[in-house]
Image: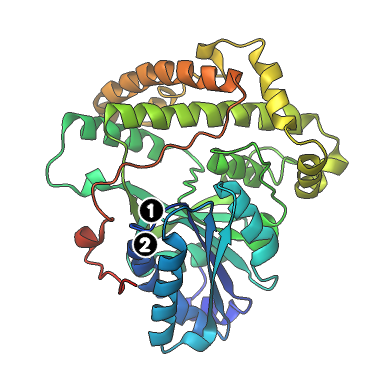
Amino acid sequence: MLPHNTIERQLRNGVAIAVFAWNEEKALRTVLASLFRQTLFERVRQSGSRTHIFCVLNGCTDRTPEVAEGVLNDWLEANPGKESITTRVVSLPERGKLRAWNEFVHTLSPTEAEFLIMMDADIVIRGRETLWQLVQTLRWHPEATVSVDLPIKDIALAKRRSVKDLLSLGMSKMVRHSEAQLCAQLYCMRSEVARNIYMPADLKACEDGYIKSLVCTDIATRPLNPRRIQRAEEASHVFEAYTSPAAVLRNQKRQMIGLTVLHVLLDKFIPSLPKSQKRNLAAFLAEKDRAEPGWLLRLIAQHLEKRSFWNLFPGMLTHRLAPLRRLPWTARLMCLPAALVGVGVTLCAGWTAYQSLRLGSVDYWPKAERASDGFAGDLGLAQPTQR
């Protein structure tokens, strides 16, 4: 492990942060409050470099752009280290996080930025060192290309939990023991790797699985290496869990659509490409989107001709049970009810996903049902001044 002061001296090329938002006027103040508390800004300033913050908004129809501009301006004006920080709000007319991701990585982020941090606008970052730990982890692990934190469901912090809360937490416990987990809500990536990745237009709700596969295989050129993704110590964020039956089913439908699209793209299409196209995969996929709109939808339609709703992708019915094998026996027994419920939900969600996919619809992203403006009260965050 490198000494702390050595890390700071080596960080000369800066960090760019993207906050992706779609109609988050209520939650945005809270997530930005947790962002502003991070020690990353002072660490980067002390190293003689800069931090760039981009609020990348996509297809917003509420006051998210005005809120973002007001909160960023107020914070920057009051920040004593503002000479080392740049902020910008970018509003894209079309909805879609993946479009926003492409815009940030390939157009907005400064070419000199060494690390790119991606975060959603409906989470709260815990601890003041989380973002710095993400950057440090990539310094400590030269073989890693992505660093992640620990995602925590808000119900895990609740004093009282219902049966459905316990089932939800049981599913999280199983997933947490899997290798190379990447939660798209918050992660850090080496910029040179990110710029070799392009999100196809019809990929939709599969960002985390797509990035995980490409970074762990060196852009589809080598066998999978889970060490490409490393978890940062003492780094975490909180997000609102889906707990109502309707919300859980909608979220599972999104996941079934996403996993089906990933199977078609990563298991069938990309492996069939010649090495020359894999070596420059980002440019190849960007050109394919431009020249052949809807090409991925056509591949999905061909895939569905030979599939049933319970077999959209390999291991569909068993992927909820597979994580049990990595747990101790006592933990297996505790998590078994959640796994069995997950199988049932998968079947129901698979049926609804199958119907949507047959209609050529992959653009499905249910909005979280919030009872409040975020988690500021739980984590002791002060809300930024409203404008």
Q: Residues within 10 Å of mark 1 (few under 14, many from 20)?
A: many
> In the image, what residue occupies the spot 27% across and 21% down?
337
Marking on residue 122 = 1
Q: Which residue is mark 2?
A: 31
Q: Position of residue 168 (x, y in %)?
A: 29, 33
Hey, which quadrant is residue 304 in on the image? top right
Q: In this orientation, does residue 180 appear?
A: yes
Q: Is 97 on the left or on the right of 193, as rendered? A: left
**Which x, y percent locates residue 143?**
62, 56
**Of the numbered discs in the image, which one, if any, rests on residue 210?**
none
Residue 315, visible in the rendered structure:
no
Up/down of 107 relative to 113, above or below: above
Kind of residue at disc 1: Asp
- The three-letter code of the residue at mark 2 reads Val
- Residue 367 location, x and y as percent? 40, 41
Q: Between residues 247 and 123, which one lies in front from this camera angle?
A: 247
Q: Residue furthest left?
A: 160
In the image shown, does 349 or 4 lie closer to the viewer?
A: 349
Residue at point 67%, 26% (across, down): 264
Q: Residues within 10 Å of mark 2 (few under 14, many from 20)?
A: many
